[in-house]
Image (tube, grey):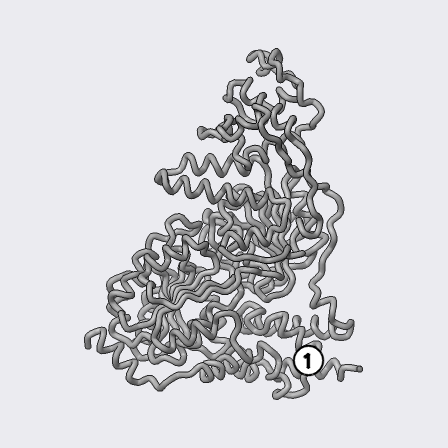
Amino acid sequence: MPAEEVQERGREAMSEPTLEAARALLRRHHGHEDFRLQQAGAIEALLAGRDALVLMPTGGGKSVCYQIPALLRPGTGVVVSPLIALMQDQVSALAQIGIRAAFLNSTQSAAERRATEQALREGALDLVYLAPERLLMPETLALLESIPVALFAIDEAHCVSQWGHDFRPEYRQLSVLHARFPRVPRIALTATADPRTRREIVEALALQDAVCLVSSFDRPNIRYHISEGQNARERLWDFIEQAHPQDAGIVYCLSRRKVEETARWLSERGRVALPYHAGLDDATRAAHQARFLAEDGVIIVATIAFGMGIDKPDVRFVAHLSLPKSIEAYYQETGRAGRDGEPADAWMAYGLQDVITLRQMMQEGTAEEQQQRIQQQKLEAMLGLCELSTCRRQALLAWFGETLDAPCGNCDNCLQPPQTWDATEVARKALSAVYRTGQRYGTGHVIKVLRGLRDDRIERLGHDRLSVFGIGDALDEGEWRGVFRQLIARGLLAVDAGGYGVLRLTEASRPLLRGETTLELRKRASSGRRQKRRAAAVEALAPADQALFEALRALRLRLAREQGVPPYVIFSDATLRAMAEHRPADEAALLEISGVGQQKLERYGQAFLDEINAHGVKLA
């Protein structure tokens, strides 16, 4: 049967699905009373056979936008995802709520693939997950043309953008879906797309007639903290020990070596810390990710260039020990914290060497000149976010075209406004030293000259006889590094390619050297004690409720191990906290708790009711 007839046959079998029918499925499978953000609009569009472009923050519930319509429309929903490592977790989670799902990817044996393909032909699947490379294979497209397809969901749609942080060339070929399946609605979803990237998604995927639904990019539960300076690892340990002594978290580093060293260092300090990068074999990566998902309090240390695809809702902190390449990368990586909506931290420490290394990597790369310029602009914007003395959330949202009318009150700059100082003369000294030494040396050498420190090299070059020798002895090395980092960030100094971090003046430095302008720089932050912050929701629980909450978590862990799934797949912390607070006495009351659907009630309801009853009636 021709492909169009197959899809037409599927549509004729469809009764008119309504948004109320969609809400009923949401209650049954997910245990929620109503949709949030742009979910309802996306579902209505798909049920009407229209395409949609959906932008929602990480943790905003993008998957519901295609899961529910796939159940209501005839046929199987096809989900395109770039993250093979995440597919098994997604399929397992869907099985827990009674949705029939499977995946087709390179991790399967030939027999497993044949079984999934047969299930597709028999109409036994509600959803099937594929990587774009698998979808684009002629045999896969032929298979899909032979069955009714409910919809196509293109997840992580920002991968279309060749100037983005996660570019996947195969994504640009997904326009074939519009050409070969013109009557099947498509939904493209992403959490990280600035206005330019949105336009590129529309153009590349032929979504000109799509309904565009944009939610706020704000994640108000995440507290942003960015600092520069030395001893980053020690400061990271202070942060973890004081704010998250038992919580799960992710630490990002720039290189594989730094990942390994940091994981080992954290382990020696007593935390369970596991490395995760592309240099590890598949079995080790899978084992580390499984422990992170299944156990409480595990820290994953990963390279910022490697997309882990973590779908764990109770990650309480994301820390960067290296500077991300762009605001989009920073937003996506920090967005893995607090997906459950509870308080979380995005913490970052960076230094001058990060700036130099990233710029050299860009300059030495094989990218075309235009792409290098775009990458450079993105790095400058990331540095600008770091150098801010005003609200970070306002700047972060502005990058995505969103306006926050007032400072957020939940970032480091709002909570502890940074001080600035008149650095005009100091900056002139720094620029003069770069110029007088011939614009041929790196930061370390120039700082030695400024501080008047002699060594064999300085004496051999005659730099101890320069007029700038010793004119900066009032500042120590750390203070000078802070000055140079900000001068580079503001574009007054550039770092040449070649691997040696050579500094040179830019045109932007001339007005300052001529005395035509002044310069205010951010003062270095004190390394004093940081305030320990616990989740407000946890603090709100009474002691007896807190004891029940911990007992429910222990029960969840035992059931999860028996089922071979991560604990959060059973119930989220928020759902357990509601159980502890309200103490439902029967199945009807338990079903009223958000996050308890019919399927989970049947599977786990009695076990949790028994645990609640064992703790007695809540006293007034």
In this rendered view, identify the residue nearer to me: 349 or 546: 349
| Residue at the (68%, 80%) spot, across then down | 611
The residue furthest right is 620
Say which residue label 1 marks.
611
The type of residue carrying mark 1 is: Glu
The number of numbered discs placed on residues in the rendered structure image is: 1
Give coordinates of residue 99: x percent, y percent. Answer: 44, 77
Give coordinates of residue 587: x percent, y percent. Answer: 61, 87
Task: Write down the quadrant of residue 112 in the picture.
Answer: bottom left
Give coordinates of residue 487: x percent, y percent. Answer: 57, 33
In this rendered view, identify the residue nearer to me: 22 or 194: 194
Q: Quadrant of the N terminus?
A: bottom left
| Residue at the (62%, 74%) spot, across then down | 575
Please say whether residue 264 is visible from this viewpoint.
no
Asked which secondary structure carries label 1, the reply is helix
| Residue at the (29%, 65%) spot, across then down | 177
